[in-house]
Amino acid sequence: MQLGFAGCRTAFRRCCRWLTCSGSVPGQEPRDQYEVLCLGLTGAGKSTALATLVGEPSDSLEPTTGFNIKTLPVNDTVLNIKELGGSVRPFWQEYFRDAHGVLFMLDAAGGEASLQAARQTLAELLPQLKGRPCVVLATHSDVSGCATQSQVEQLLEGLMHGRKSAVLSCSRGQRQEVLKALEMLTGYMTASIK
């Protein structure tokens, strides 16, 4: 009985997602869909930011082991966001081929060692992502002593090599800041593909 209920619930969610996100309502054009990778070191705030974005509770989240997928309509498009856990970094490259863009999160309050580790990780990733747009979101910007947005921009200077990119900051629970990053990334992806 439980298995039947779970199957029905899954089918219902897929149907609702299709109806709300695909734009396949009679008389409307289907929406463009983009695959976005959400990457960052363990503890960068990826799960919290995405949960806040889709209206899920974020108080008792555990670090992602493996991946988590969120589907979200943004600017007349649909983003399929794959959050890949920091603990599975060796497997991230398996997802690069299908990605249209990257949202990279780093902990602005993690201290110098954490910022340098995030920089090194991003430096290793970007050549494999072959010019795909990237928005860096510096999380925990509300914590005293965190790196400012301009400090993060300086830290990452020279890494983007002409690709469409931006650095933004956000604090916990601020949906609009995360949405702004995704809107910016959507604009970059749309311009790159068309």
Image (cartoon, helix red, strand yellow):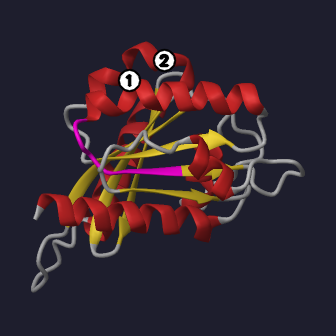
Q: Secondary structure at mark 1?
A: helix
The answer to whether mark 2 and mark 1 are in CB contact below 8 A is: yes
For residue 10, what is the image quadrant? Answer: top left
Quadrant in the picture for the N terminus: top left
Does the rendering let one see residue 159?
yes
**Above/below status of 164 relative to 47:** below
Amino acid tagged 2 = Val
Name the spot of residue 41 as percent of width and height, x first.
Answer: 59, 28
**Above/below status of 27 relative to 131:** below
Does the rendering let one see residue 1?
no
111 sits to left or right of 15: right
Amino acid tagged 1 = Trp
Quadrant in the picture for the C terminus: bottom left
Question: Pointer 1: what residue?
Answer: 92
38 sits to left or right of 51: left
Q: Is residue 131 magenta?
A: yes
Within 10 Å of disc 2 (Cα), the crowding (few <14, some 14-19, many 20+) is some
Q: Which residues are magenta?
A: 130-136
Query: How far apart in space, not on screen, are marks 2 and 1 (Cα)?
Result: 7 Å
Q: Residue at x 33, y 75 (%)?
A: 75
Name the spot of residue 149 as percent of width and height, x first.
Answer: 65, 57
Residue 39 - label? none
Task: Point out the residue furthest to the right here.
Answer: 144
Question: Pointer 2: what residue?
Answer: 88
Task: Point out the residue furthest to the top here.
Answer: 90
17 sits to left or right of 27: right
Q: Secondary structure at mark 2?
A: helix
Q: Residue at x 17, y 78 (%)?
A: 25
Of 155 and 60, nearer the camera is 155
Name the spot of residue 157 as percent of width and height, x first.
Answer: 50, 45
Q: Residue at x 44, y 29 (%)?
A: 123
